[in-house]
Amino acid sequence: MNRYRLSTSRLIYFLLALLFLLAISDVYAAKMSVTEFISEFTRNHYQQRFIAQTDLVKNNRELVPQAVDRLIGETKQGDKSFEDRMYLLNIASSMAYMQRHLHGDGEPLAKVDPLIKEEMRKEKERNAELMKWKKEEQFLGNFVMKRHAKELKQAGLAPVLYPHWKHRLLFECKVCHNSIFRMQRWINEISQEKIVAGEQCGTCHNGNIAFSANDREQCGRCHIAGKPEAEKLHNPDLIDHTEVKKAAERVGAQWHPEKLVNGRLPVDRFGLIDWMVMKQNDVFRPITSLEKGFKEETRDNKILFVSRSNFVNNVLFDHKVHSDWISCSACHPAIFSDELGGNDMKMRDMSKGLYCGHCHGKVSFKFADCKRCHSLPADARVDALVRPTRH
Protein backbone atom coordinates (compact mmCIF):
# COMPACT_ATOMS: atom_id res chain seq x y z
CA MET A 1 0.00 0.00 0.00
CA ASN A 2 2.83 2.41 0.87
CA ARG A 3 4.68 1.44 -2.25
CA TYR A 4 1.53 2.22 -4.34
CA ARG A 5 1.03 5.59 -2.65
CA LEU A 6 4.67 6.53 -3.31
CA SER A 7 4.34 5.66 -6.95
CA THR A 8 1.17 7.72 -7.19
CA SER A 9 2.95 10.72 -5.63
CA ARG A 10 5.81 10.38 -8.06
CA LEU A 11 3.35 10.15 -10.92
CA ILE A 12 1.59 13.32 -9.81
CA TYR A 13 4.90 15.21 -9.57
CA PHE A 14 5.89 13.92 -12.99
CA LEU A 15 2.61 15.07 -14.53
CA LEU A 16 2.89 18.51 -12.95
CA ALA A 17 6.45 18.89 -14.25
CA LEU A 18 5.32 17.78 -17.70
CA LEU A 19 2.49 20.31 -17.72
CA PHE A 20 4.92 23.06 -16.67
CA LEU A 21 7.33 22.16 -19.48
CA LEU A 22 4.50 22.08 -21.97
CA ALA A 23 3.32 25.48 -20.81
CA ILE A 24 6.81 26.90 -21.26
CA SER A 25 7.16 25.36 -24.69
CA ASP A 26 3.77 26.82 -25.66
CA VAL A 27 4.98 30.29 -24.65
CA TYR A 28 8.10 30.01 -26.78
CA ALA A 29 6.18 28.32 -29.57
CA ALA A 30 3.72 31.18 -29.72
CA LYS A 31 5.07 33.68 -32.17
CA MET A 32 5.41 37.33 -31.13
CA SER A 33 4.27 40.03 -33.53
CA VAL A 34 6.85 42.53 -34.83
CA THR A 35 5.16 45.24 -32.80
CA GLU A 36 5.38 43.18 -29.61
CA PHE A 37 9.00 42.33 -30.32
CA ILE A 38 9.97 46.00 -30.79
CA SER A 39 8.10 46.98 -27.64
CA GLU A 40 9.74 44.23 -25.55
CA PHE A 41 13.19 44.90 -27.02
CA THR A 42 12.93 48.63 -26.36
CA ARG A 43 11.80 48.08 -22.77
CA ASN A 44 14.68 45.65 -22.09
CA HIS A 45 17.12 48.00 -23.83
CA TYR A 46 16.38 50.98 -21.58
CA GLN A 47 16.11 48.88 -18.42
CA GLN A 48 19.49 47.29 -19.25
CA ARG A 49 18.09 43.78 -18.95
CA PHE A 50 20.88 42.21 -20.99
CA ILE A 51 20.08 38.53 -20.34
CA ALA A 52 16.41 39.02 -21.22
CA GLN A 53 17.50 40.94 -24.31
CA THR A 54 19.79 38.11 -25.42
CA ASP A 55 17.06 35.50 -24.93
CA LEU A 56 14.58 37.65 -26.85
CA VAL A 57 16.80 37.88 -29.92
CA LYS A 58 17.86 34.22 -29.66
CA ASN A 59 14.25 33.05 -29.76
CA ASN A 60 13.01 35.51 -32.40
CA ARG A 61 15.66 35.43 -35.08
CA GLU A 62 13.13 35.79 -37.91
CA LEU A 63 11.58 38.96 -36.38
CA VAL A 64 14.76 41.04 -36.16
CA PRO A 65 15.05 41.92 -39.90
CA GLN A 66 11.37 42.89 -39.98
CA ALA A 67 11.72 44.98 -36.81
CA VAL A 68 14.76 46.80 -38.19
CA ASP A 69 12.91 47.55 -41.44
CA ARG A 70 9.91 48.78 -39.44
CA LEU A 71 12.03 51.17 -37.37
CA ILE A 72 13.85 52.49 -40.45
CA GLY A 73 10.49 53.12 -42.09
CA GLU A 74 9.26 55.06 -39.05
CA THR A 75 12.20 57.47 -39.31
CA LYS A 76 10.87 58.56 -42.72
CA GLN A 77 7.31 59.18 -41.59
CA GLY A 78 6.24 62.71 -40.70
CA ASP A 79 8.49 65.64 -39.92
CA LYS A 80 10.68 64.00 -37.28
CA SER A 81 13.53 65.80 -35.55
CA PHE A 82 17.11 64.57 -35.61
CA GLU A 83 16.70 63.33 -32.03
CA ASP A 84 13.56 61.33 -32.88
CA ARG A 85 15.17 59.70 -35.91
CA MET A 86 18.31 58.80 -33.96
CA TYR A 87 16.22 57.27 -31.17
CA LEU A 88 14.63 54.85 -33.64
CA LEU A 89 17.88 54.11 -35.48
CA ASN A 90 19.76 53.41 -32.25
CA ILE A 91 17.16 50.79 -31.25
CA ALA A 92 17.40 49.25 -34.72
CA SER A 93 21.20 49.27 -34.53
CA SER A 94 21.19 47.44 -31.19
CA MET A 95 18.90 44.77 -32.64
CA ALA A 96 21.05 44.43 -35.73
CA TYR A 97 24.30 44.04 -33.78
CA MET A 98 22.79 41.28 -31.63
CA GLN A 99 21.42 39.56 -34.72
CA ARG A 100 24.88 39.47 -36.25
CA HIS A 101 26.52 38.31 -33.02
CA LEU A 102 23.96 35.61 -32.11
CA HIS A 103 22.89 34.40 -35.55
CA GLY A 104 25.67 35.50 -37.91
CA ASP A 105 23.16 37.57 -39.92
CA GLY A 106 24.78 40.90 -40.86
CA GLU A 107 22.16 42.09 -43.35
CA PRO A 108 20.08 44.23 -40.90
CA LEU A 109 23.25 45.95 -39.70
CA ALA A 110 24.29 46.67 -43.28
CA LYS A 111 21.00 48.56 -43.67
CA VAL A 112 20.98 50.61 -40.49
CA ASP A 113 24.65 51.57 -40.07
CA PRO A 114 24.89 53.76 -43.22
CA LEU A 115 21.68 55.55 -42.21
CA ILE A 116 23.13 56.45 -38.82
CA LYS A 117 26.33 57.76 -40.43
CA GLU A 118 24.29 59.84 -42.89
CA GLU A 119 22.16 61.31 -40.10
CA MET A 120 25.29 62.27 -38.17
CA ARG A 121 26.83 63.84 -41.26
CA LYS A 122 23.74 65.96 -41.96
CA GLU A 123 23.49 67.04 -38.32
CA LYS A 124 27.15 68.06 -38.32
CA GLU A 125 26.55 70.19 -41.42
CA ARG A 126 23.42 71.72 -39.88
CA ASN A 127 25.27 72.65 -36.68
CA ALA A 128 28.16 74.10 -38.68
CA GLU A 129 25.67 76.27 -40.59
CA LEU A 130 24.02 77.44 -37.36
CA MET A 131 27.36 78.26 -35.73
CA LYS A 132 28.49 80.20 -38.79
CA TRP A 133 25.52 82.55 -38.50
CA LYS A 134 25.72 82.58 -34.70
CA LYS A 135 29.14 84.19 -35.03
CA GLU A 136 27.67 86.85 -37.31
CA GLU A 137 24.85 87.54 -34.85
CA GLN A 138 26.92 87.50 -31.65
CA PHE A 139 26.92 91.31 -31.63
CA LEU A 140 23.50 92.53 -30.46
CA GLY A 141 21.48 94.02 -33.27
CA ASN A 142 23.05 91.96 -36.06
CA PHE A 143 20.58 89.78 -37.95
CA VAL A 144 21.45 87.41 -40.80
CA MET A 145 18.61 87.46 -43.30
CA LYS A 146 18.87 83.95 -44.71
CA ARG A 147 15.28 83.01 -45.50
CA HIS A 148 16.03 82.95 -49.25
CA ALA A 149 19.44 81.31 -48.83
CA LYS A 150 18.99 78.88 -51.75
CA GLU A 151 18.00 81.59 -54.21
CA LEU A 152 20.84 83.82 -53.02
CA LYS A 153 23.37 81.02 -53.45
CA GLN A 154 22.16 80.43 -57.00
CA ALA A 155 22.59 84.15 -57.68
CA GLY A 156 26.12 84.09 -56.23
CA LEU A 157 25.15 86.32 -53.29
CA ALA A 158 25.78 85.92 -49.57
CA PRO A 159 22.85 86.50 -47.17
CA VAL A 160 22.30 90.03 -45.90
CA LEU A 161 23.86 90.88 -42.54
CA TYR A 162 21.67 93.66 -41.19
CA PRO A 163 23.37 95.76 -38.47
CA HIS A 164 20.70 97.34 -36.28
CA TRP A 165 23.39 99.21 -34.35
CA LYS A 166 24.76 101.09 -37.37
CA HIS A 167 21.29 102.30 -38.32
CA ARG A 168 20.60 103.20 -34.70
CA LEU A 169 23.42 105.75 -34.85
CA LEU A 170 21.30 107.78 -37.29
CA PHE A 171 17.69 106.80 -36.58
CA GLU A 172 15.58 106.27 -33.47
CA CYS A 173 13.89 102.86 -33.42
CA LYS A 174 10.51 104.58 -33.92
CA VAL A 175 11.55 105.70 -37.42
CA CYS A 176 11.12 102.14 -38.72
CA HIS A 177 8.96 100.43 -36.09
CA ASN A 178 6.13 99.89 -36.69
CA SER A 179 5.54 102.18 -39.66
CA ILE A 180 7.97 100.40 -42.04
CA PHE A 181 8.72 97.11 -40.30
CA ARG A 182 6.77 95.17 -37.72
CA MET A 183 8.98 94.73 -34.67
CA GLN A 184 9.31 90.95 -34.88
CA ARG A 185 11.74 88.82 -36.79
CA TRP A 186 10.68 86.68 -39.80
CA ILE A 187 7.20 88.18 -40.19
CA ASN A 188 7.94 91.09 -42.56
CA GLU A 189 8.31 89.00 -45.74
CA ILE A 190 11.21 91.12 -46.93
CA SER A 191 11.95 90.76 -50.65
CA GLN A 192 14.10 92.47 -53.27
CA GLU A 193 10.98 93.22 -55.32
CA LYS A 194 9.42 95.21 -52.46
CA ILE A 195 12.69 96.98 -51.68
CA VAL A 196 13.21 98.09 -55.31
CA ALA A 197 9.59 99.31 -55.33
CA GLY A 198 10.47 101.70 -52.50
CA GLU A 199 9.04 99.63 -49.66
CA GLN A 200 10.78 98.14 -46.62
CA CYS A 201 14.55 98.88 -46.87
CA GLY A 202 13.81 100.77 -50.10
CA THR A 203 12.15 103.51 -48.04
CA CYS A 204 15.63 104.84 -47.34
CA HIS A 205 17.85 102.95 -49.76
CA ASN A 206 16.65 104.96 -52.71
CA GLY A 207 19.78 106.87 -53.73
CA ASN A 208 18.77 109.95 -51.72
CA ILE A 209 18.70 109.06 -48.03
CA ALA A 210 21.06 106.10 -48.52
CA PHE A 211 22.62 104.22 -51.43
CA SER A 212 20.14 102.72 -53.85
CA ALA A 213 19.13 99.08 -53.41
CA ASN A 214 18.55 99.05 -57.17
CA ASP A 215 22.23 99.71 -57.88
CA ARG A 216 23.81 96.31 -58.57
CA GLU A 217 27.27 97.68 -57.81
CA GLN A 218 26.13 98.22 -54.20
CA CYS A 219 24.92 94.63 -53.58
CA GLY A 220 28.07 93.71 -51.67
CA ARG A 221 27.39 96.37 -49.04
CA CYS A 222 24.45 94.37 -47.66
CA HIS A 223 25.04 90.82 -48.92
CA ILE A 224 28.05 90.41 -46.69
CA ALA A 225 27.25 87.66 -44.17
CA GLY A 226 30.01 85.10 -43.83
CA LYS A 227 32.55 87.23 -45.68
CA PRO A 228 35.70 88.81 -44.18
CA GLU A 229 34.20 92.25 -44.83
CA ALA A 230 31.52 91.48 -42.26
CA GLU A 231 34.06 91.95 -39.46
CA LYS A 232 33.38 95.68 -39.39
CA LEU A 233 29.73 94.98 -38.57
CA HIS A 234 30.44 93.07 -35.38
CA ASN A 235 33.37 95.10 -34.13
CA PRO A 236 32.42 98.70 -33.22
CA ASP A 237 36.10 99.63 -32.96
CA LEU A 238 36.24 99.43 -36.77
CA ILE A 239 33.62 102.16 -37.17
CA ASP A 240 34.39 104.78 -39.84
CA HIS A 241 33.56 108.08 -38.11
CA THR A 242 33.92 110.09 -41.32
CA GLU A 243 31.40 107.85 -43.09
CA VAL A 244 28.94 108.07 -40.18
CA LYS A 245 29.29 111.87 -39.97
CA LYS A 246 28.53 112.29 -43.69
CA ALA A 247 25.51 110.00 -43.40
CA ALA A 248 24.29 111.92 -40.34
CA GLU A 249 24.51 115.24 -42.17
CA ARG A 250 22.66 113.77 -45.14
CA VAL A 251 19.66 112.56 -43.08
CA GLY A 252 19.57 115.42 -40.58
CA ALA A 253 21.09 113.60 -37.61
CA GLN A 254 24.20 114.56 -35.62
CA TRP A 255 27.41 112.63 -34.96
CA HIS A 256 30.12 114.00 -32.64
CA PRO A 257 33.03 111.52 -32.51
CA GLU A 258 35.18 114.16 -30.78
CA LYS A 259 33.12 113.51 -27.63
CA LEU A 260 34.21 109.86 -27.54
CA VAL A 261 37.09 108.75 -25.34
CA ASN A 262 39.96 107.80 -27.67
CA GLY A 263 37.45 107.70 -30.52
CA ARG A 264 35.92 104.46 -29.21
CA LEU A 265 32.22 103.80 -28.73
CA PRO A 266 31.43 103.23 -25.03
CA VAL A 267 30.69 99.60 -24.23
CA ASP A 268 29.24 97.69 -21.29
CA ARG A 269 30.95 94.83 -19.47
CA PHE A 270 29.97 92.47 -22.30
CA GLY A 271 31.64 94.61 -24.95
CA LEU A 272 28.30 95.81 -26.34
CA ILE A 273 27.52 99.46 -27.14
CA ASP A 274 26.23 101.41 -24.13
CA TRP A 275 23.60 103.58 -25.80
CA MET A 276 22.66 105.45 -22.62
CA VAL A 277 26.23 106.68 -22.14
CA MET A 278 26.23 107.74 -25.80
CA LYS A 279 23.11 109.84 -25.25
CA GLN A 280 24.24 111.27 -21.94
CA ASN A 281 27.51 112.43 -23.50
CA ASP A 282 25.67 113.87 -26.52
CA VAL A 283 27.78 111.80 -28.90
CA PHE A 284 24.86 111.46 -31.31
CA ARG A 285 21.38 112.78 -32.02
CA PRO A 286 19.45 110.42 -34.28
CA ILE A 287 16.37 111.61 -36.13
CA THR A 288 12.92 110.61 -34.86
CA SER A 289 11.00 110.36 -38.15
CA LEU A 290 11.27 110.57 -41.91
CA GLU A 291 8.07 112.63 -42.00
CA LYS A 292 8.04 116.42 -41.83
CA GLY A 293 6.09 117.90 -38.96
CA PHE A 294 6.27 114.65 -36.97
CA LYS A 295 5.07 115.15 -33.42
CA GLU A 296 7.03 112.96 -31.04
CA GLU A 297 5.11 111.04 -28.40
CA THR A 298 7.01 110.70 -25.12
CA ARG A 299 5.72 109.28 -21.88
CA ASP A 300 7.44 110.53 -18.73
CA ASN A 301 6.51 108.38 -15.76
CA LYS A 302 8.05 105.49 -13.85
CA ILE A 303 6.77 102.18 -12.56
CA LEU A 304 8.17 100.32 -9.59
CA PHE A 305 8.37 96.54 -9.99
CA VAL A 306 8.84 94.93 -6.58
CA SER A 307 11.02 91.86 -6.80
CA ARG A 308 9.63 88.55 -5.53
CA SER A 309 13.08 87.60 -4.21
CA ASN A 310 14.48 89.14 -1.04
CA PHE A 311 18.04 89.07 -2.39
CA VAL A 312 17.25 90.78 -5.73
CA ASN A 313 16.83 94.54 -6.02
CA ASN A 314 13.62 96.09 -7.30
CA VAL A 315 13.21 97.43 -10.83
CA LEU A 316 12.38 101.06 -11.52
CA PHE A 317 11.07 101.16 -15.07
CA ASP A 318 11.48 104.56 -16.74
CA HIS A 319 8.95 105.12 -19.53
CA LYS A 320 10.79 108.17 -20.85
CA VAL A 321 14.03 106.28 -21.46
CA HIS A 322 12.11 103.80 -23.59
CA SER A 323 9.67 106.14 -25.32
CA ASP A 324 12.58 108.33 -26.41
CA TRP A 325 13.61 105.36 -28.57
CA ILE A 326 10.39 103.62 -29.49
CA SER A 327 6.77 104.59 -30.03
CA CYS A 328 4.19 103.56 -27.44
CA SER A 329 2.22 101.57 -30.04
CA ALA A 330 5.24 99.29 -30.59
CA CYS A 331 4.76 97.87 -27.08
CA HIS A 332 1.12 98.51 -26.22
CA PRO A 333 -1.06 96.52 -26.28
CA ALA A 334 0.65 93.75 -28.31
CA ILE A 335 3.54 93.14 -25.88
CA PHE A 336 2.33 94.73 -22.63
CA SER A 337 -1.18 95.26 -21.31
CA ASP A 338 -1.94 98.94 -20.69
CA GLU A 339 -3.49 98.08 -17.34
CA LEU A 340 -1.17 98.66 -14.38
CA GLY A 341 -0.45 95.28 -12.79
CA GLY A 342 -1.91 93.47 -15.79
CA ASN A 343 1.39 91.88 -16.86
CA ASP A 344 2.50 88.82 -14.91
CA MET A 345 6.15 89.09 -15.98
CA LYS A 346 8.70 86.45 -15.10
CA MET A 347 12.36 86.20 -16.07
CA ARG A 348 11.86 82.79 -17.67
CA ASP A 349 9.23 84.31 -19.99
CA MET A 350 11.51 87.21 -20.88
CA SER A 351 14.30 84.78 -21.76
CA LYS A 352 11.91 83.23 -24.30
CA GLY A 353 11.38 86.58 -26.01
CA LEU A 354 8.24 87.70 -24.19
CA TYR A 355 7.69 91.06 -22.46
CA CYS A 356 11.06 92.85 -22.06
CA GLY A 357 12.66 89.98 -23.97
CA HIS A 358 11.08 91.32 -27.15
CA CYS A 359 14.08 93.71 -27.37
CA HIS A 360 16.50 92.90 -24.56
CA GLY A 361 19.00 90.26 -25.51
CA LYS A 362 18.30 90.93 -29.19
CA VAL A 363 18.93 94.62 -29.87
CA SER A 364 19.23 95.97 -26.35
CA PHE A 365 21.49 94.97 -23.46
CA LYS A 366 21.54 91.39 -22.17
CA PHE A 367 19.56 90.04 -19.21
CA ALA A 368 22.88 88.89 -17.76
CA ASP A 369 23.56 92.56 -17.02
CA CYS A 370 21.11 92.21 -14.10
CA LYS A 371 21.84 95.44 -12.23
CA ARG A 372 21.02 97.60 -15.24
CA CYS A 373 17.36 96.94 -14.33
CA HIS A 374 17.49 95.57 -10.77
CA SER A 375 19.09 98.74 -9.47
CA LEU A 376 16.78 99.90 -6.70
CA PRO A 377 17.29 98.48 -3.18
CA ALA A 378 14.13 97.46 -1.35
CA ASP A 379 14.56 100.18 1.29
CA ALA A 380 15.25 102.99 -1.21
CA ARG A 381 12.95 106.00 -1.24
CA VAL A 382 11.27 106.60 -4.57
CA ASP A 383 9.59 109.42 -6.44
CA ALA A 384 5.91 110.13 -5.70
CA LEU A 385 5.12 109.52 -9.38
CA VAL A 386 6.08 105.89 -9.04
CA ARG A 387 3.21 103.43 -9.01
CA PRO A 388 4.10 100.03 -7.49
CA THR A 389 3.33 96.61 -8.93
CA ARG A 390 4.60 93.10 -8.23
CA HIS A 391 7.28 91.57 -10.48
Image (cartoon, rainbow, N blue to C red):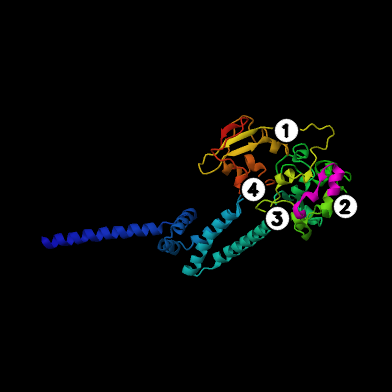
- Residues shaded magenta: 245-264
Pinpoint residue 20: horizontal percent, then vertical percent.
30, 58
Label 4 with label 3: CB-CB less than 8 Å? no
Q: Between label 4 and label 3, give the one nearer the viewer.
A: 4
Q: Earlier in the sequence, mark 2 or mark 3?
A: 3
- Callout 2 crowding tier (Cα within 10 Å): few <14, some 14–19, many ≥20: few
Residue on which the image places disc 1 = 298
Q: Give the quadrant of residue 301.
A: top right
Q: Gap between marks 4 and 3, in whole Å? A: 19 Å
Residue on which the image places disc 2 = 216
Q: Amino acid at mark 3?
A: Trp
Judge whether residue 205 can be spotted in this image.
no
- Residue at 80% of width from left, 37% of height from top? 289
Question: Extreme left residue here?
Answer: 1
Q: Earlier in the sequence, mark 4 or mark 3?
A: 3
Pinpoint residue 179: horizontal percent, then vertical percent.
77, 36
Q: Between label 2 and label 1, give the one nearer the viewer.
A: 1
- Residue at 85% of width from left, 34% of height from top? 292
Residue on which the image places disc 3 = 133
Q: Earlier in the sequence, mark 2 or mark 1?
A: 2
Q: Secondary structure at mark 1?
A: loop
Judge whether residue 267 can be spotted in this image.
yes
- Callout 4 crowding tier (Cα within 10 Å): few <14, some 14–19, many ≥20: some
Q: Amino acid at mark 2?
A: Arg
